[in-house]
Image (tube, rainbow, N blue to C red):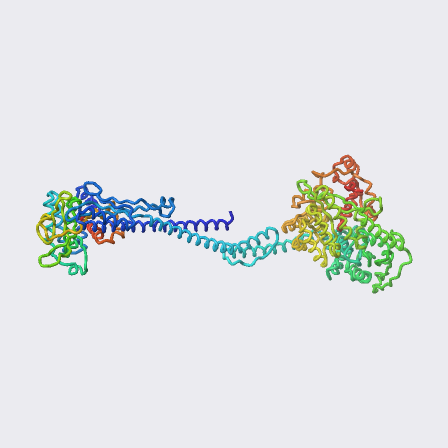
Amino acid sequence: MTLTRRIALFIAALLLLALGGALVIHTLAARDVLLQQQDSRNRDAAASLALALSQQGGDKTAMLSVATAQFDLGHYRSIQLVAADGSALISLQQPAQLSGSPDWFNGLLPLRAADGMAIVSSGWQELGTLTVSAHVAWAQHALWQASVRSASLLALLAAIAAIVSTWMLRAWQRPLRATIRQAQALARGQFIEADLPSLPELQELTRSMNITVGRLRETFAAQAEQVVHLQRQAQLDPLTGLALQPQWLQVLSRRQVQQDHVALLLVHVQGLAAINAAHGREQADALLRCVAGVLKRHSSVDAYTFAGRLAGPEMALLLPPSERACDRAARLYETLYEALRQAFAPLGLGQPLLVVAYDGAPADSAEEMLALLRTQLPQAQAGGGLCMLRRDADASEVVVSSASPARPAASQPLAQAATQPAPHPTPDPATQPTDRRAHKAQAVQALSEALAQGRAALGEFQVQDAQGRLLHLECPLRLQLQPSGEFQPAAQWLALARRAGLTPQVDLCALTLALRAIERDGQARAINVELRSLVAPGFVQAVAARLAAAPRAARHLWVEWTEGASSGDWAAAGEATTCWRALGVQIGVEHAGSAPEQLPRWRDMGVDYVKVDALHLRGAATNTHVRAYAHSLAGLIRLLGLKAIAEGVEDSADLAVLWQLGYEGATGTALTAPRQLGTEPAVTPERAKAAPGVDAVASNKAPAPTPAPASASASASDAAPVPAPASASARTAQSKQSLTGRGRSSGLNSNSRPAPLGTR
Amino acid sequence: MLLLAVLQLWAALSAQAWDNHQMRAAAQRLGPNAVAAVEPLQSMLRAAQTQDEAAKLSAANQFFNLRLRFAPDIEVWGQDEHWATPLQALNAGAGDCEDYAIGKYAVLLAMGVPHTRLRLVYVRAKLPDLATPVPHMVLAYYAIPNAEPLILDNLQAAIVPASQRPDLAPVFSFNSESLWQGVGQAAAGSAMARLSRWRETWARIQLEGLL
């Protein structure tokens, strides 16, 4: 029973006891008074009548008339005169009248007073004993009326007391409820500080809770800081202190998505192996550190400059979008060269540096950009160490120019080479410029048509928990760009959709398909939504309308977007979260882990889960830094009250470690067959539809382990759509694509996946 | 205290109506005259245990007639009307007609005379030196019910039958029986008990240990 009810019951019992007791005591006291009154009445009546009778001189008739007169004029029940020998000289009786009080009351409180007795004499002789008894009916009636009056007054008092106490209890409940609300909000993960209530007991409690809330906030901030620290530790190159390749590539990808213009520099140190052999490992390392030092100095200038170490001899510097890499390239080259010359002149290094600068429109992926720059390294070598590339937004060609820095021996200031359009065609493997522009327009047209006609389907990838239960299905969208063609995963067309501004339609299409699929089988599904769709006008409302039209399905829907929100996105994301969560949708952040300091902000907005990008988790079983970072990420996410889900887990050892670290869900190829899912045939031809860039990149890498047993198992089991990937290239393609960090990495998994459900 | 309990027990066992110790204590509260009178009173009570009723009547009558001088209440107590207990009257050394009658009545009851034989009677007394009768109270003893009573009076020293007292005209008689129907000693403390003069006096008599 609640405290309030207990207090109310106690007050009621107390009132009952007090007022009931008062009624009983009053009634009994009144009865005592009435009895004593009656006693003395009887006695007085007997004495006076006996006196009167004694004056009659023994005349029986006279005595009788006196007694009768007294009896008739008074309220007597009986008057009796008994002689000494027992004979009744006078006997007058009148039975009890109706008293007007209920019989049960009379029975409960009988009024039986003592009879009055007196001696009647005549002269010196005693005639007999007179016994007089008056009626008690009046007394009983009076007692009854007094009791009824008391009872009603006390009942009225009780009612007033009850009302007053109810009102007081309510008033006292208010601060208690406020405190409870604060505690409940705390349990839900909302950290509110409450005003101090008026009750002193609760004041202490609220004060303590406010202090706890403050401490929790500090803990979060400290935790986030620690996570960031561990991130740096896990993701910085130990030798040079620059970011590692995955992180740098992810930053580049993000920059390419968010900006229309990128500027970056690739620095390649030649002949590292020769230096290593000739002068030893320490010299090679020192050389690298020297170069890295210069780049670090440049990157520490502002937040938008980012340096990273790519492969062994390669480093890269990402510049702010407002800068021109080509302008800075020459100065950078000179600075680097001077630094190296001072440190390593005795070594006679010759010209170890190659710098490729790029200004212009972003590429479709970070790998593509990197590949482009790397192909220009020979050009740079030929051009004296520096090569500059330009590409405009509309143009599809890359303008190459190279500058010839002065020879090292001359120590002359470098001459700024004028940039001229190169006469020879670009090494870009794409077609001619005009063809490329037309091709792009054509692709946009095909994309719009596919969306309009609904030639789309959803892939399905398991997200399971530690017990193997299915949390939801991740459903990337695939579009049939050519009628009766293959369903292309997002990697093929998403960048195009972004540039064409078609992402709202893409996301709405995915939403419609997902809701339809959920209504069909009731299985929870997750779809990806682009951040730039959120800011598109009317998008949030359109999604809300469709969710409201299918309320049961909406409750099984999970919606996620990437972590890297820029300042313009927060408001839209907040609006979308509030709006869609009210309809039952779960909101999450995917590809997270690079900006852990943003996670508390996401939590305050109201997201429910966080999917950590594979690049932060790969190697958790073997690399202690990665494991520590993954652990602290999971800890932070869980501390914020969110679900932590691991993405792209390929290694079963990693998976086991991730379960131990506290991840509540995982997706990726390392998951074993689920408990429940329909059968899907294993289809290998889809691998052939991987993006050209992907293949080009994949061909640079060493092939993955043998495909034969895997494919045999894939074709053998028709109820296991999530076993080890069926082919080597598929696996590498998958691993490469998961580095893009942009919403469709799991879409690339479709390369090894069977045909989607419900496909046309 | 133990001695007191033993004494009371002995008093009860010896069928003695009065309580020596209580009487002495009450007498001490009242004054030296009462203390002086307690001893002869108690010895008279003791002696009366072996006497017949006539002797008891005579002893009680004489005791009070000799020790009390007649004086109106206004002179003795400063009040118009005051009924004194026997010890109070003995302490004052004076009393009026009711004091005599009540004193003799209480003492005779203590001696063991049944209360059915005793009556206190309101009479009109014709005094020799007054033309009109005056209100008076006497104690009447009925050897057998409805027989002619013997009158114990302070106007005359001798105890004579009523027929030999033509100066007395009875008005009304009563005794303690009619006042205590079914009520025991406990009622002495009741507030109602003190509302009538006779009952209050009777309660005080009981407190003094005579009965």
Q: Is residue A5 left or right of residue A261?
A: left
Q: Is residue A390 visible?
A: no
Residue at screen point 19% across, 47% down? A120
> Which residue reaches farthest top?
A716
Count all numbered tags in the image, as a single digit.
0
> Which residue reaches farthest right?
A423
Q: Is residue A611 visible?
A: yes
Residue at screen point 46% across, 51% down? A11
Front residue of B160 and B102: B160
Front residue of A93 and A475: A93
Front residue of A459 and A336: A459
Front residue of A526 and A709: A526
Where residue A483 appears, as percent x and y from the top left, is 85, 45
- Up the image or down, A99 lies above or below A409; here it is above
Where residue B8 appears, as percent x and y from the top left, is 20, 45
Where residue A185 appears, as percent x and y from the top left, is 59, 53
Quarter of the image that includes the C terminus of chain A: top right
Q: Is residue A242 left or right of residue A170?
A: right
Where residue B50 appears, as percent x and y from the top left, is 11, 42
